[in-house]
Image: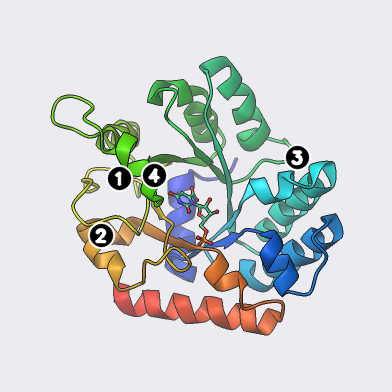
Amino acid sequence: MREAFGKRLADAVSTRGPLCAGVDPHPSLLRDWGLATDASGLERFALTATEAIAEHVAVLKPQSAFFEAHGAAGIAVLQRVIGLAGEAGALVLLDVKRGDIGSTMAAYASAYLGEGSPLAADAITVSPYLGFDSLEPALRQAEATGRGVFVLARTSNPEGERVQRADAGGGRTVAQSVIDAAALRNAGTAPMGHVGVVVGATNEPGQVELTRLNGPILAPGFGAQGATVRDLPLVFGDALPRVLPATSRALLRHGPDPAALRAAVLSVTDQLSQLLG
Ligand SMILES: O=C(O)c1cc(=O)[nH]c(=O)n1[C@@H]1O[C@H](COP(=O)(O)O)[C@@H](O)[C@H]1O
C-alpha cells in the first residue's frame, strides 16, 4: 500500500522542488518540433518530453485532451506517459477535469484512481460544478489508494471570474466555498491532505483565502498565460509553500532537444528555489 498522497507529494517537492511540468501536445507544438500532427507525432512528442523532464520534477501533468484527440492510439500513448513518468519518480497528475453525478463520478474514480486501472495516475483534476459533494466517490477512492484530487476553485482563465467569484452566500465566493470544502476534508492530516485545489497564478491577489486548506495548490497560468515567478508571492502570500506552479507551453517550446528541455526545467526550478529560500 502506498503512502498517503500528501506525504508522497511533500517528499517529492522537498527533493525536486515544486514545479509541475505540463505535457500538453498541442498540434502547433508538434509542428514546431518538426513532427506530424498525427498519433505518431504525438507519441514522439509526449515520450521525448516525458523522458527529458519527468526525472527532474515533483509532478508531471499530462493534459488528457490532446491525447484523446487521437482516439485509441492517443490513449495508448497517455498510458505509456503515465508509466514512464512514474518510473522516473515523478508523481503524475492527470489533467482530465472530470465532474459528474456521483454514480458516474464513481466510474471516473475507478478509471483514473483505481488500483490496477490502466490509466490510474497519482492524482487527477476534477470540476466541482455539479456540486462539491458529487465528487465524493473520487475523494474517497483517492484517499483509499494513496492518491489525490485537485478541485478547480479559481481557475486561470478570464471566463472563470463570473461563476467563481459569484456570491455563494455567507459572504463567500463560489471559489472560496470550494476551497473551504476541500479544507474540511484535509483537516487533521499531516503533512497535508489529499484534496488539492486549483488557483490560477494569473489571478489578482486577495481573491481567495488559502491558509486553512492544509492541502496542495495547483497554480497554472504561469508561463504562456502571462504570470511570472515573481507574481507567485503576491498571489499566494503565506500559502506559497503549498503551491505547485504549473507550466506547459513555456517549457515545451524548448524542445525537441532533450537537453534544452531539461535546461528549461532546471532553470525554472532554480528560480523557484531562490524565491522560496
Ligand atoms: O487544471 C489545470 O491544470 C488548469 C486549470 C486552470 O485554471 N488553468 C489551466 O491553464 N489549466 C491547465 O494548465 C495548462 C496550462 O498550459 P500553459 O498555458 O501552456 O502553461 C493547460 O493544460 C490547462 O488545461
Name which residue type carries label 1. Answer: Asn
Give the residue number, with chain letter if any, for mark 2: 235
Is 51 drawn above or below residue 192 in the view shown? below
Q: Which mark is residue 159?
A: 4
Is 111 situated left or right of 35 in this image?
Answer: left
Of marks 1 and 3, which one's residue comes earlier in the chain? 3
Q: Nearer the viewer, mark 3 or mark 2?
A: 2
Q: Are marks 2 and 4 in contact (CB under 8 Å)?
A: no
Separation of residues labelled 3 and 4 (CA atoms): 34 Å
Name which residue type carries label 4. Answer: Glu
Local packing at callout 4 (Cα closer than 10 Å; few below 14, some 14-19, many 20+) is few
Name which residue type carries label 3. Answer: Pro
Please report the residue visible at 22 percent of the width from the left and 43 percent of the height from the top: 212
Say what secondary structure mark 4 lies in. helix
Q: Nearer the viewer, residue 233 or 40?
A: 40
Of marks 2 and 4, which one's residue comes earlier in the chain? 4
Q: Nearer the viewer, residue 145 or 43?
A: 43
Of marks 3 and 2, which one's residue comes earlier in the chain? 3
Q: Which mark is residue 214?
A: 1
Give the residue number, with chain letter if any, for mark 3: 118
